[in-house]
Image (spheres, rainbow, N blue to C red):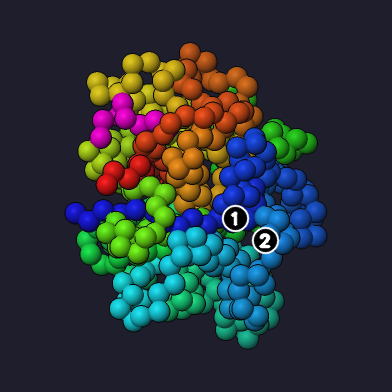
Amino acid sequence: MRRVVVTGLGLVTPLGVGVQHAWKRLLAGESGVVSLIGRNGDPRFAELPSTVGAVVPQGNANEGGWNAIEWIEKGDDRRMANFTQYAIGAAEQALRDAEWKPTLDEQKERTGVCVGSGIGAFDDTVNATAAYEKGGYRKVSPLLVPRILINMAAGHITMKYGFRGPNHAASTACTTGAHSIGDAARFIMFGDADVMVAGGTESCIHPLAMGGFARARSLATEFNDRPAEASRPFDRDRCGFVIGEGAGAVVLEEYEHAKARGARVYGELLGYGLSADAHHMTAPPSDGSGAHLSMRRALNHAKLPASQIDYINAHATSTPLGDAAENQAIKALMLGKDGKQSASEVNVSSCKGAVGHLLGAAGAVEAIFSIMALHEGVLPPTINLHNPGDPAEDFDCNYIPNQAQEKEVRAVLTNSFGFGGTNASLMFGKVDV
């Protein structure tokens, strides 16, 4: 089987645009969660039970802000929904970072894209529906369908760079980003491509989307007056997730191909595991059995024992049930016969305290944070974690509370789980030549 390595990274997040901007703020324990009251002049945000969100900051890219005209051609904003624009920005960063600029036809034919989204162009759909109800089909933009299709983020990236390899888009709710990276790696492993741009993107902070999540009792509602404290994975006062937006993209490359061109390598994708809960539309089984299965399959793919995992980047969204189930799954995996000796040796954190839940982009963004932990030997903190629980005796791992920790890291595991009971785990490791 062909080996797959990571040679480029790109981020558009609530902590900033650009890997270094976001990573620096993440390690500093900062939060990208803000109040949504008054956002875009829309009074409906104030009427929601949850009025907080993790929003990509506007501004100059050199300062970590987002300005679409720095990433897309003039006029393309009409053709591209916001989630596609974010994907273009993240992909451009990753390709620059990888220094991959193919010019030959054979190179472009061996380069593909796998970028998905969970919800996609929510604003466009809502606005088009309102226009149709008011004025009929003539009021609907001819660009509506090309803007809202989930695969358009991937499609526009292929068109911008002329890549003619696999053109693929996963849409598996909050597991999308992880599935996209894992699927892209398999395209390389099985010889369909030598290089893949892979990741996830999302931009659906809208009163209607939030209303749906609120009605499902998924959102944090107890910290509207303290937005930065609202997302608190593993903490006993957690009360729901905070909706976020952004994109993450990686350049994956066949090992010998990367080596031949002298590319800088962040790490190797060692394992990819998938599973289904087969349990409930929105809730995991309390024992985390589906999560355990995806992690175990990633380990089996990597041919590594659990004892060799130095850090787990948890999906942990700050929901009471979800965090508890994942914690059970992690402990079952890591304290098994091939695992650690004690829970205190299990290093696990969730970045969602800082960036909220980026839905379809979460798996890609958090994979990049995991790769950075591997590359730099620093474990990102779980912010807002003051009292692990509930019950406290079940939450006895090292959750990297509130402050980053330096540690030699050779293998990391990152989890993503989604509505419909879909799970994915990715394992990255140092490259052994």
The residue lying furthest to the top in this view is 393
Residue topped by disc 2: 61
- Give the amino acid at mark 2: Ala
What type is the residue that disc 1 sits on? Answer: Gly
At mark 2, the secondary structure is: helix
Q: Nearer the viewer, residue 16 or 121?
A: 16
Q: How many marks?
A: 2
Answer with left or right where residue 318 lies relative to residue 339: right
Nearer-the-camera pick, 74 or 52? 74
In which quadrant will I find the N terminus?
bottom left
Label located before the other in sequence (1 or 2): 1
User: In the rendered image of this protein, does residue 14 appear above or below residue 283?
Assistant: below
Q: Decide if residue 332 is in sight here.
A: no
* In-front residue for pair 379/313: 379
349 in the magenta segment: no
Circle 1 crowding by C-alpha within 10 Å: few under 14, some 14–19, many from 20: many
Q: Residues within 10 Å of mark 2 (few under 14, many from 20)?
A: some
| Residue at 67%, 61% in the rendered image | 61
Q: Is residue 306 magenta?
A: yes
Boundaries of the magenta span: 304-311
Determine whether label 1 and label 2 are within 8 Å by CB. yes
Residue 188, percent from left and from top = 28, 61
Q: Is residue 5 left or right of residue 313?
A: left
Above or below 339: residue 202: below
SS state under label 1: loop
**Residue 267: x and y, percent?**
38, 47
